[in-house]
Each structure stands twice: as structure tokens, then as C-alpha cells.
Image: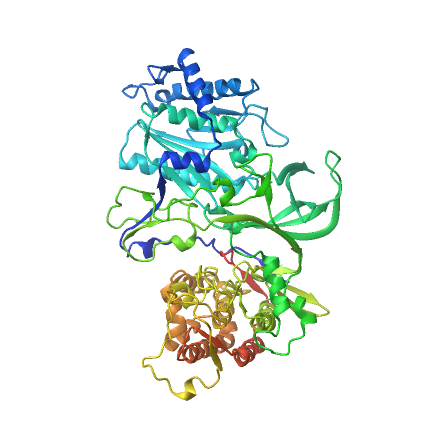
């Protein structure tokens, strides 16, 4: 009987790493108001703006071309100092709507009295102001007109009376962290707006999966017309222009909230979230993975659900990237074409999860609300181009004192690849243009890192070598092998392992191969990929024939003269190696004393929280051997054979990197896969076959 226990919750701590580095200044693009207006907001025509401005002066909302009741030299406390703006901004909304169509305002601005109510029970934050939709999007709850629910919010705001580096930093941290929470907690969210004010300095923000943008400084008392334009634009916006995803519907079913997604012409309702950690970051793919069932009932009818379970992935892929189904179909069609290994194509889906449907999502276009358009960066930025070299707005201005943590990026704002890399610089965080994509696939087995049977894990990894051969025979590298991308099940008494998540997979011979090369999951990414350089290049330019004898090679046509690094299949094999090493240092044979567990735990932290330590583990035979000797006795035999795999990986890297035209070569890896299949089989042969305890660590 196998069970999960929590030895000690694992929370990565980068303090000791960052303290040794020079200061890294993380920044986001700061753009002119005119570009922000064109790219991020619905258009407000000049005639309407002039009429609105005149009406605001006549009605007294504006006094002497500034906001009624607001004075920058006021001695009131912060809460009362900015209170007049709430009433004035709401009057702008009401009068703008009245001039357009006379209907009820769709949005309302308020100062929350309590923390916003979130669908994530762990969320708790209270912005200084929020703009929310007047009719709540929540199901089964609050009265209409309230902005108490997070899912209603379209803008978050933070105020500070003084303008100092410290107060600017505090506002930036709050606005970015809270916006990240909204993007993570609400699956119907595509983007969100923000506003920060220090004294009279005001900045407008836009947060999406591809861009975080902030305006250059405006002034509350000088740029009144620009602020009126901003509020009027939000007041006239449809749901899609406010950042909501009309292709997802929130419903109440049973005793809780569920979400209904459309894909492949059908509707599917969520049962539970399988994975959502990547959606915590604003920039990036924002991937959510759900277990879903088909909705059989029509719109307006009582919900009736099918019985078959599927897996639905909702993510934002680069606009120029193929979908996962397009990649999977290409691999299938190209089996044995890149290298003929004599593989049986009829067994292809023994190693890959079947994709039932996949599509790029269409919604009401932000450029023409009467037309459907792709839900993409190009669409929601209204085909405006953000400069490649924009002005940098620092996410933290105040220099941190000696001995303190010097990483400026607020939690949840930026992806892991933007963590400090040990150099002093300003680094502007920009992602690629992205398009919203949805994939429906078969539900199969359990994720590898959830398996508590240790020997089954080794069987699955050995089995997957053949799956990687299929990719190699088609000329594809996976580039993101991890314990979260391997699904394991039992079929007719045998372990079966299937590969998922082909978002990062690429053909070795495609022209765009060199771009976006740094991919992979923490802990499992190949060391060379993590460092972006080759570690085993020869010391001289003339390698001996015996160093390259196991490889046949032909040069690829040059595709990018500036490219210096590319993935190869050894990097994918190395990821399997790291999965096993991770497993050995993060699980314990049942019955071990807590003192011995803690020793293994400390080794885990040293090995997997430092890229340099992993590099030493791979390259230095003595260090690897010494580290593996610290494993519990039950794992010692596996450790010895894992040590041999490390030596073999190093030897194979040296061979391929000694090729004269490396890395622009077509390498014959057929024998290499066979070699490592034998090595992993030897680990399996001595694998611990007892009950194990699995601490709750973060994993891929």
C-alpha cells in the first residue's frame, strides 16, 4: 500500500543565490500615452470626448479644469485625500454613457472595504480602488452592483500620498502582484488594467500574457482630458475589451463553481483542475489543465453531462507557433522519414496521448466588435506595434541595502527565465505575441510524479525511450521532458507511459529552430540548455576518429548565422536522467527515521536549487559519486547505476560536440537511444521495490 505524506513543504528560496549577484534591474516597457490609447483601449471619438468634457465642466465634476474636491496640497489622510476622485470618475462613466445611449453604466468604481472575494480560497488582498462590471459575473452570490468579487474587476488601483522611490516601489509591487492573482484566479480573464498614483503622478497599466505595459507619467491635474478619455473608453467597452473571455462560461453545478469551455464545436465542463501553476505568471503561456466532461444539454436547459472524462488544456502559444495537434500530426506523418528505425507506426499512440480536438480561439474582435477574430496579441493590441527598444520602467527603484535580497520583480509578475542570471543590467521583460489555444485530449493514467510505486516509475522511464525514438525518427526534439509530462498506466499487466505537452517540440531542420531555444522544466532541464552553452566541446580542433566513430553526420543548411546553441536528443535523454535523480533524492523508503530523511532533504536542496551544482553533478564523476553515496541504503544500487548513466551522458556529449560541424549537423542517434535504454534497464533491474513516502515538492 503506497501513500503520500508531507515531510516538509518545499518552497524554493533564492535568497542565498541572489545575494551573491550584482543588482539586476528588472523592467517593463514604458510607452507614450498615445500608443497606450491606440493599443489597449477602445476608440473614443473626438466629438464625444469634447462633448463629455464640456458636460463635466457644466455639471461641476471639473472645477477650473481639475477634479472637484481634489487638491494636491490637502492635509487629509490618504483615504480621504483621494476620495473625491471616486465620485468624479463615476460621474465621468455615467455622463459618457448618457451621451452615447442613455443606458445604465456597465462599470462602477469603488473603494473596497474588505479583501476581494475570490474563487481561490487562498487569495486575500484589498486594492485601494477597483473598477468592476456593474452586473456581477459571479454565479450564486452577491447582489448586482457590487465590486466585492474579484471576477468582476477590470481595473485595480493603488494610491500613495507622496512620490518617493519607496512609495513608487510599494505601488508597483501591489499592482503587479494583485494583477497576477486576478489572472491566475479567474479562468475567464485575458487581460486586466491597472492604475497607480503617487501624489499627482498617475500611470496606467495593462497586463496580458504577452505584454505588461505602463504609460509614461501623467499628472492628475494637468492631463485631465487624457484621464477622462481613459475612463470613457472603459465605460464604452464590451466584455472582450474589458479583458474577459467570452469563450468560457462560469456556471454553478452541484455545490460549486465550474467552467464551460468550447472546443471542437462542443462544450465541456470542468470537473477538477489538474494543473494551473503556470497560470500564476502574468507573462507566458498561462497554461491551465482541466479534467472535463462533455455538456450534453443545450443553452438554457438544466445541465446534463456525459460520462467520459477528457483532459482540456487552455494556454497562450506564440502566434507563429503550431498547435500541439499540428505538431503531433506532423510527428506521426514523419515517423521513419528523418531516420528509418523500422518503427511500427501502428504503435505510435502507445507512446503519445491522443488529441481529440485543438483550435485557436476566436472571440469578438477588439478591432471590430461585430466580427469574430483570433484571440491574440495582435487582436487585443489592435495591430499596434510595441517598440523593440522601449523605455524601461524599473519594477523597483530603491536600491536594496547590503546583504538584502536584490531581486526586484514582484511575485507572480514574470516567468522563471527572467530570474537574475548573475550580471548587472536593466532587463526589459517582453514576451512573444501570443494566441489563445485550446486542446482536448484523451484522459490517460496518472502523472509520473504522483506515482508512489518506485519501480513503476523506472519502468515508465525505460518504456519512454521508445517514445523518444519515434520523435527522433521524425526529426523532432521534445525540449520539455519532465515528470509532469509523462503519464503512466497499467495495460494488461504492463506499465505504459505516454508523452504529453508538445508545445515546445521542434523539428531539428526547421528554419526557426534556433529561436526560443531556452525551454524546459525546473529540475529536469538539461544543464547545457539551462546555461545556454555547450559544456563538453573538445580542447583542440582536431578530434581523433574514435571520438566520433559512432555518429554519421551531414551538415544542415545554415539557417541563422548568429545562432550558437541548439537542442539535440541527448538533452531530452538527460532530462530522463534528472527525473530519476530527482526521484531518488525526493522520496524515501517507508520507515526511515526523520533525521535520515532530513539529510536527504538537504542534499535535494543543494542539488536542485543551484544550476551550477547540477552542472557539477553531471560533469564531475567524483562529485556525482559522493552525492549519490548519501542516498538511503535501499537506493544505493540504483545510485551506482545512475552514476554510470552520468558518465555515459558525459561521454556522448563529448563525442557529438567533437564533430567538425557541430552543432549544424544531422546526427545519427539510433544507437545512442539503444545504449541508454540498456542503461535505464539496468537501473530498473535493481530498483527498490518497496513502499515509498513522497514529500510534497514542486515538480514539473
Residue 119 image offset from top left, x and y in percent: 56, 38
Q: How is the image coloured?
A: rainbow
Relative depth, front residue between 583 and 472:
472
Residue 162 image offset from top left, x and y in percent: 28, 29
Identify the image quadrant of the N terminus: bottom right
Q: Is residue 56 above or below residue 694?
A: above
**Which residue is depicted at the point 56% across and 80% down?**
674
Residue 581 image offset from top left, x and y in percent: 48, 68
Q: Is residue 366 above or below residue 488?
A: above
Relative depth, front residue between 8 and 564:
564
Query: Relative to 350, is 457 on the left or the right?
Result: left
**Which residue is depicted at the point 48% across and 39% down?**
382
**Which residue is depicted at the point 49% across and 45% down?**
377
Q: Residue furthest front?
A: 47
Kindly indicate the quadrant of the structure image that contains residue 196.
Answer: top left
Kindly indicate the quadrant of the structure image that contains residue 345.
Answer: bottom right
Relative depth, front residue between 39 and 412:
39
Q: Tell me if I can see residue 239 in this picture.
A: yes
Query: Relative to 684, is 214 on the left or the right?
Result: left
Query: Relative to 398, is 56 on the left or the right?
Result: right
Q: Tell me if I can see residue 112 in this picture.
A: no
Kindly indicate the quadrant of the structure image that contains residue 612.
Answer: bottom left
Relative depth, front residue between 589 and 296:
296
Amino acid at each position: 500500500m503506497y501513500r503520500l505524506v508531507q515531510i516538509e513543504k518545499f518552497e524554493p528560496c533564492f535568497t542565498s543565490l541572489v545575494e551573491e549577484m550584482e543588482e539586476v534591474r528588472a523592467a517593463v516597457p514604458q510607452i507614450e500615452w498615445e500608443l497606450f490609447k491606440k493599443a489597449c483601449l477602445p476608440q473614443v471619438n473626438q466629438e464625444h470626448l469634447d462633448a463629455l468634457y464640456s458636460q463635466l465642466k457644466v455639471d461641476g465634476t471639473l472645477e477650473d479644469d481639475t477634479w472637484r474636491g481634489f487638491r494636491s496640497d490637502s492635509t487629509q489622510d490618504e483615504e480621504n485625500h483621494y476620495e473625491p476622485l471616486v465620485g468624479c470618475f463615476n460621474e465621468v462613466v455615467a455622463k459618457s454613457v448618457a451621451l452615447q445611449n442613455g443606458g445604465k453604466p456597465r462599470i462602477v468604481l469603488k473603494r473596497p472595504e474588505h479583501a476581494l472575494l475570490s474563487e481561490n480560497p487562498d487569495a486575500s488582498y484589498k486594492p485601494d480602488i477597483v473598477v468592476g462590471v456593474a452586473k456581477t459575473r459571479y454565479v450564486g452570490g452577491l447582489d448586482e452592483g457590487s465590486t466585492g468579487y474579484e471576477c468582476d474587476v477590470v481595473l485595480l488601483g493603488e494610491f500613495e500620498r507622496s512620490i518617493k522611490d519607496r512609495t513608487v516601489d510599494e505601488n508597483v509591487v501591489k499592482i503587479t502582484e494583485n494583477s497576477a492573482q486576478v489572472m491566475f484566479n479567474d479562468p475567464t480573464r485575458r487581460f486586466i488594467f491597472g492604475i497607480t498614483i503617487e501624489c499627482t503622478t498617475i500611470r496606467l497599466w495593462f497586463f496580458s500574457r504577452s505584454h505588461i505595459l505602463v504609460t509614461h507619467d501623467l499628472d492628475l491635474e494637468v492631463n485631465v482630458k487624457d484621464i477622462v478619455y481613459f475612463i470613457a473608453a472603459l465605460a464604452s467597452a464590451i466584455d472582450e475589451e474589458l479583458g474577459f473571455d467570452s469563450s468560457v462560461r462560469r456556471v454553478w453545478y452541484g455545490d460549486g463553481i465550474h467552467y464551460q469551455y468550447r472546443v471542437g464545436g462542443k462544450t465541456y465542463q470542468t470537473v477538477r483542475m489538474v494543473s494551473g501553476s503556470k497560470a500564476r505568471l502574468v507573462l507566458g503561456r498561462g497554461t491551465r489543465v482541466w479534467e472535463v466532461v462533455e455538456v450534453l444539454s443545450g443553452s438554457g436547459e438544466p445541465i446534463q453531462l456525459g460520462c467520459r472524462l477528457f483532459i482540456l488544456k487552455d494556454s497562450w502559444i506564440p502566434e507563429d507557433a503550431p498547435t500541439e495537434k499540428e505538431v503531433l500530426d506532423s510527428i506521426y506523418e514523419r515517423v521513419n522519414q528523418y531516420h528509418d528505425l523500422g518503427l511500427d507506426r501502428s504503435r505510435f499512440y502507445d507512446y503519445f496521448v491522443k488529441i481529440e480536438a485543438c483550435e485557436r480561439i476566436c472571440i469578438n474582435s477588439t478591432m471590430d466588435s461585430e466580427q469574430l477574430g483570433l484571440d491574440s496579441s495582435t487582436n487585443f493590441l489592435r495591430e499596434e506595434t510595441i517598440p523593440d527598444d522601449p523605455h524601461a520602467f524599473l519594477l523597483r527603484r530603491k536600491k536594496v541595502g547590503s546583504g538584502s535580497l536584490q531581486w526586484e520583480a514582484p511575485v507572480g509578475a514574470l516567468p522563471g527565465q527572467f530570474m537574475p542570471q548573475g550580471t548587472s543590467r536593466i532587463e526589459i521583460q517582453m514576451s512573444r505575441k501570443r494566441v489563445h489555444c485550446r486542446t482536448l485530449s484523451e484522459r490517460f493514467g496518472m502523472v509520473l510524479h504522483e506515482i508512489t510505486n518506485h519501480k513503476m516509475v523506472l519502468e515508465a522511464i525505460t518504456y519512454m525511450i521508445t517514445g523518444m525514438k519515434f520523435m527522433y525518427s521524425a526529426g523532432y526534439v521534445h525540449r520539455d521532458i519532465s515528470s509532469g509530462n509523462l503519464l503512466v498506466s497499467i495495460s494488461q499487466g504492463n506499465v505504459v507511459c505516454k508523452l504529453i505537452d508538445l508545445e515546445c517540440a521542434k523539428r531539428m531542420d526547421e528554419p526557426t529552430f534556433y529561436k526560443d531555444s531556452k525551454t524546459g522544466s525546473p529540475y529536469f532541464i538539461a544543464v547545457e540548455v539551462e546555461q545556454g552553452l555547450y559544456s563538453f566541446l573538445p580542447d583542440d580542433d582536431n578530434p581523433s576518429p574514435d571520438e566520433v566513430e559512432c555518429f554519421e553526420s551531414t551538415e544542415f543548411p545554415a539557417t541563422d548565422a548568429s545562432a550558437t546553441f541548439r537542442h539535440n536528443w541527448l538533452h531530452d535523454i538527460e532530462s530522463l536522467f534528472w527525473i530519476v535523480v530527482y526521484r531518488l533524492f525526493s522520496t524515501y523508503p517507508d520507515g526511515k527515521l526523520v533525521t535520515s530523511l532530513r539529510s536527504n532533504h538537504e542534499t535535494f536542496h543543494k542539488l536542485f536549487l543551484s544550476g551550477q551544482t547540477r552542472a557539477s553533478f553531471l560533469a564531475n564523476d567524483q562529485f556525482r559519486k559522493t552525492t549519490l553515496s548519501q542516498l538511503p541504503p535501499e537506493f544505493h544500487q540504483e545510485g551506482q547505476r545512475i552514476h554510470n548513466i552520468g558518465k555515459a551522458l558525459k561521454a556522448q556529449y563529448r563525442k557529438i560536440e567533437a564533430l567538425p560541424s557541430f552543432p549544424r549537423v544531422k546526427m545519427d542517434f539510433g544507437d545512442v537511444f539503444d545504449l541508454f535504454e540498456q542503461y535505464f534497464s539496468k537501473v530498473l533491474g535493481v530498483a527498490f521495490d518497496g513502499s515509498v513516502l513522497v514529500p510534497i515538492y514542486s515538480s514539473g
